[in-house]
């Protein structure tokens, strides 16, 4: 080590972990656990303090996990910790109408899980339960290290790996850097990756509702001219809503107290579940489409919203992110088994080739669906209503849509095959 050249080479090839994952939400921890199963070590860099994440109480946020995502969580040993807190989605009903008038057409879609042999199409699960299960699993895994209350301020790539600098002055080095840091991904921006997309002019209002009557495990999607209202079943007589309105209207509704918010929600929600009340907090999220122009760069890969953010109209945002997780973990695990360097371009291009087309297709499908349904054009209303009726009337076509909603179509990663 007296030779300074050899000293530099030795330092360059010393790694804190195989993978540095920026983003401690849901996709980042899931990737760390999936990569650990493939024999790879990870460091997860999370801006949030651990105490904040562990102490989360009910706040109304929940996810519609497709069957493919449930399979992945089961394969990672996570589902056992949350299964008793999840609500199976047994049916999905889709209709078209206006606030206060109910459905305006006899045509609708009705998906029943009994039409496929795999079981429920998916489950609703609260954010706090899923997040806590991920934290506990990472704590118990020797191949995963978590850095809480940490922020990346710089990243640098060289031939042997990637180095990131944290705001507190620490440096970390790995073979591969993964951005799981959301739609405004700093990881992607620092790598020079640009994004394509547009604003929908809509804001999603999200909260949980207590109701008098049981929901029967049925999810509802009600399309109205300003945007869709999804009513998604939670355990007990409680449902999660994702309600899209124009930015201006959403801002006005969010400024109301709970009583005022319920007053404007009731004509849209209807009375089929009896009286309703707000449960937990209310949240709002501006809606846009944003897709990274590349999912990979030198020694870098993007997953989840860092790679693609889409309209929640089909509830596929987190499910698409989990499919990224399963695909990337499989590509990296197979590369490791073959003796390949996991951060090199040929390996990362296999991940991009696997996920980019499927993601672009899903993003465009959700975009077109939102544009088709979020209006009051009589001609478009006739087209979409006849289309829903036609799909609903053909069992084979209907089953295809059910399998799509369950996340069982396309080139599934091994973790999602059950």
Image (cartoon, rainbow, N blue to C red):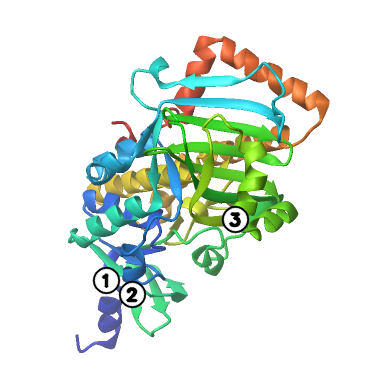
N-term mark: 1 or 3: 1
Helix, strand or loop at disc 3?
A: strand
Q: Give neighbour class at mark 2: few <14, some 14-19, many 20+ (Cα, 10 Å).
A: some
Q: Nearer the viewer, residue 7 or 360?
A: 360
Residue 172, numbered label: 2
Image coordinates of residue 189 in percent, x first then y, are 56, 66
Which residue does the image show at 46% across and 32% down from the upper left? 213
Q: Can residue 244 be seen from the camera position used here? A: no
Q: What residue would you read off at disc 3?
A: 285
Q: Nearer the viewer, residue 193 or 33?
A: 33
Which residue does the image show at 26% across and 81% down from the upper left? 6
Left or right of residue 23, residue 361 in this image: right
Q: CA distance from mark 2 to mark 3?
A: 33 Å
Q: Nearer the viewer, residue 125 or 278?
A: 278
Q: Give neighbour class at mark 1: few <14, some 14-19, many 20+ (Cα, 10 Å).
A: some
Q: Can residue 263 be seen from the camera position used here? A: yes
Image coordinates of residue 329 in percent, x first then y, are 33, 48
Residue 16, numbered label: 1
Please, is residue 54 above or below residue 259 in the view? below
Helix, strand or loop at disc 1?
A: loop
Please, is residue 342 above or below residue 156 in the view? above
Asked if the residue under mark 2 is in contact with the one under mark 1, i.e. CB atoms within 8 Å, the reply is yes
Residue 371, numbered label: none
Q: Give neighbour class at mark 3: few <14, some 14-19, many 20+ (Cα, 10 Å).
A: some
Query: Considering the image in quadrants, where does the N terminus appear?
Result: bottom left
N-term mark: 2 or 3: 2
* In the image, farthest residue toward the right: 378
Image coordinates of residue 243 in percent, x first then y, are 61, 44
């Amino acid at each position: 080590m007296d030779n300074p050249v050899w000293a530099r080479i030795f330092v360059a090839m010393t790694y804190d972990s195989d993978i540095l994952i920026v983003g401690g939400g849901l996709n980042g921890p899931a990737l760390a656990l999936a990569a650990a199963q493939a024999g790879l070590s990870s460091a997860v860099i999370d801006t949030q303090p651990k105490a904040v994440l562990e102490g989360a109480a009910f706040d109304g946020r929940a996810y519609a996990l497709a069957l493919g995502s449930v399979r992945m969580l089961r394969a990672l040993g996570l589902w056992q910790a949350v299964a008793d807190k999840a609500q199976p989605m047994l049916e999905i009903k889709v209709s078209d109408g206006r606030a206060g008038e109910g459905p305006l057409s006899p045509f609708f879609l009705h998906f029943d899980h009994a039409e496929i042999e795999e079981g429920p199409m998916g489950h609703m699960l609260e954010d706090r339960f899923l997040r806590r299960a991920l934290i506990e699993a990472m704590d118990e895994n020797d191949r995963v290290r978590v850095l809480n209350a940490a922020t990346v301020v710089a990243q640098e790539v060289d031939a042997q790996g990637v180095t990131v600098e944290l705001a507190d002055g620490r440096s970390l080095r790995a073979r591969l850097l993964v951005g799981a840091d959301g739609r405004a991904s700093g990881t992607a921006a620092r790598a020079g990756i640009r994004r394509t997309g547009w604003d929908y002019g809509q804001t999603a209002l999200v909260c949980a509702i207590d109701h008098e009557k049981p929901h029967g495990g049925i999810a509802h999607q009600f399309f109205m001219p300003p945007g869709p209202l999804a009513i998604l079943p939670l355990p007990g007589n409680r449902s999660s809503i994702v309600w899209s309105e124009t930015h201006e209207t959403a801002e006005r509704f969010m400024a109301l107290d709970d009583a005022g918010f319920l007053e404007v929600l009731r004509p849209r929600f209807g009375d089929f579940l009896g009286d309703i009340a707000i449960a937990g907090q209310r949240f709002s999220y501006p809606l846009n489409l944003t897709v990274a122009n590349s999912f990979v760069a030198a020694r870098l890969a993007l997953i989840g919203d860092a790679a693609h953010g889409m309209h929640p109209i089909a509830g596929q945002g987190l499910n698409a992110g989990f499919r990224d997780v399963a695909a990337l973990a499989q590509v990296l695990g197979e590369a490791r088994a073959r003796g390949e360097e996991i951060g090199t371009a040929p390996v990362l291009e296999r991940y991009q080739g696997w996920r980019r087309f499927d993601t672009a297709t899903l993003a465009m499908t959700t975009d077109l669906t939102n544009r088709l349904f979020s209006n009051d054009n009589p001609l478009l209303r006739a087209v979409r209503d006849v289309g829903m009726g036609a799909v609903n009337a053909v069992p084979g076509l209907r089953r295809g849509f059910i399998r799509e909603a369950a996340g069982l179509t396309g080139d599934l990663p091994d973790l999602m095959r059950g």
